[in-house]
Image: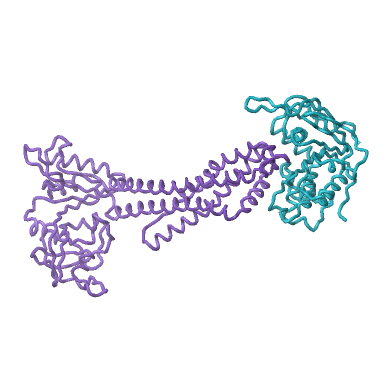
Chain colours: A cyan, B purple
Amino acid sequence: MNTKPIIACENIVKTYHNAGVDTAVLKGVSFSVAAGEFVAIMGPSGSGKSTLMHIIGALDTPSSGTYYLDGSDVSRLTDDELADIRREKIGFVFQAFNLLPRATVLRNVSLPLVYAGVAKEERERIAERALIDSAFPQAFWQHHSNQLSGGMMQRVAIARSLVNDPALILADEPTGNLDTKTGEIVLHTFQSLNTGHGKTVVLITHEPYVAEHADRIIHIRDGAILTDEKNPRRRIARGES
Amino acid sequence: MKTQDLWEETYSAVTVNKVRSGLTMLGIVIGIASVIALVAVGQGAQSSIQANINSLGANLLIVMPGASRSFGSTVNAGRGTAETLTPDDATAIASQVSNVAAVSPEVQTREQVVASGANTNTTIEGVTPAYAQVRNLQIADGVFISSQDVTAANRIAVIGPTVLQDLYGDPNSNASATPADALGQTIRISGQDFTVVGVTVPKGGTGFMNQDNMVFVPLTAAQHYFLGSTSYVTEIDVEASTQAAMTQVQNDITNLLLQRHNIPDPTQADFNILNQADIVSAASSVTGTFTTLLAAIAGISLLVGGIGIMNMMLTTVTERTREIGLRKAIGAKKQDITMQFLAESVMLTFTGGAIGIALGWLAAVAVTALAHITTSVSLSSVLLAFGVSAGIGIIFGYYPARRAAALSPIEALRYE
């Protein structure tokens, strides 16, 4: 296992200027995540967890403080440089899946590689590998994504997050739109990617039940870290029966 | 992002909503098709008018008398009414001006023509044999007026095909009269008997200069029987030997006639010279304006089509905000997004432009077939239409594309 941390946040502050009023959303957050960890970031709405997710995901930059992602400082980059970082180092899984509705599963999964300039045959080969890794049934590979159930769609999104071999998989409320049973399957997929393939996973949620599937839980409240501790009673999600 | 991938993404985006893409494209199709078709009609009119003018004769200069002017008076009668051109002027032009191929002095009058019960009022043209060469006139049957006829002032006539039908055609039947019906027959022109010796080949209507509705008689006979004077002619047609010599011939005739008529000041000239090239260029400028007008009207529909493209692209950008957010999240740069949306609008306009060119071409062919109007689809108008449609795609696609690229990925992903 790599000793260098995947995420190293030092005193991250994010302030929004709105109509002449400064609102501090993050008030000095410091933590780090080592390679191979499965971390849940928890907090109620308005706690600043979404803003933290945007900064960790290189979608936004902090007002002050530094953020090292996989060893490189990404806290002062331009929009296009951030796009490069996202493409190379981060795999996103969103609450609303965000798939291209009338494209096949295979095309959805290989989409990030289009922007990496990978040739078509190579893209499909990598996408098939990612679908196998996330245990997605081959019978559905040529289906259009809008023909799938919510749980299946989220597993397509997980496979998509794997194709660029990211340093970090960042999941934002991945079970928020799913029922308990399919949510369980999605969580199982994350756990098997973490334990079976050594992927680093950061999961943002407001549900304690979901957070308990991680091996470390960070609680955020009012823009600061409340607690950051190991989860001794980690839940193990069950896959498809 | 590779170019091939860009086109694949674009193709699938355009084909996702086929009806909307089709309707948007229709605006461009109609715009381009109307540009092609209307410019074809305009250019067809231009070439047919030029062909008509050229059918009058080649390298033609027409010398006409100016306004008659009584001595010491400033009152002008209409131009062409003066009796200042003489047969001697024609002889002088033929002998003293170089690069002249033929000179044809003419007198013109309108008279009533009667034959076997039918009658018509038409133009009587008193001519010499040179007329047939200068005005490019051909005989369908019989002979044209010879120099002996002119010398002897023979009462013979050559009639145009329209006159032939008017005099010998049966209005109650569809069968048209043939030249054989007229040859050797006697017609009465203003009370004088003339024998028909020839019928001319139809030249087609040239409007104000329709040579099919004319009766040609020897110059001297016309002067003697209809004008009552042999001292003047109403027009002298001059054929220059080459197109390049026309200006020189025109200048030489001007100088010669000024000298013969004792006029020291060229602005006081008692004659005008019409240059066929001038007529062609005047007609061309009229039809050119006409073509530009048609193209401008068609251009407006093209502009409306372009705005349709922009409207649809803006709607698409709003609809696909989340998709744009996702693409940015997984690593698309601003330029990738700009190129993708630009490519979509260019693909729509390009396809629409290609269909529009085909449709406009078909429309031009249909106009020719159904309305018998000459059309000509030029390569330049096709290239122009193609360039314009691609340009519209870029211009009207640029703003929506920039708007899409400028979306913040966070805002875009959160968009409901």
**A226 on left or right of B119:** right
- Which residue appears at 14% of the width and 42% of the height? B270
Percent position of residue B300, x then y: 44, 46
Q: Quadrant of residue A86?
A: top right
Percent position of residue A225, x then y: 82, 29
- Which residue appears at 18% of the width and 50% of the height? B236
Which one is in front, B17 or B319?
B319
Q: In this view, does B226 lie above or below A13?
A: below
Q: Quadrant of residue B211?
A: bottom left
Percent position of residue B311, x then y: 54, 45
**B372 on left or right of B140:** right
Quadrant (top left/top right/bottom left/bottom right) for the N terminus of chain A: top right
**A69 on left or right of B262:** right
Q: Quadrant of residue A166?
A: top right
Which one is in front, B283 or B299?
B299
**A24 on left or right of B306:** right
Which one is in front, B50 or A100?
A100
Among all residues in the image, which is located at the extreme right? A232
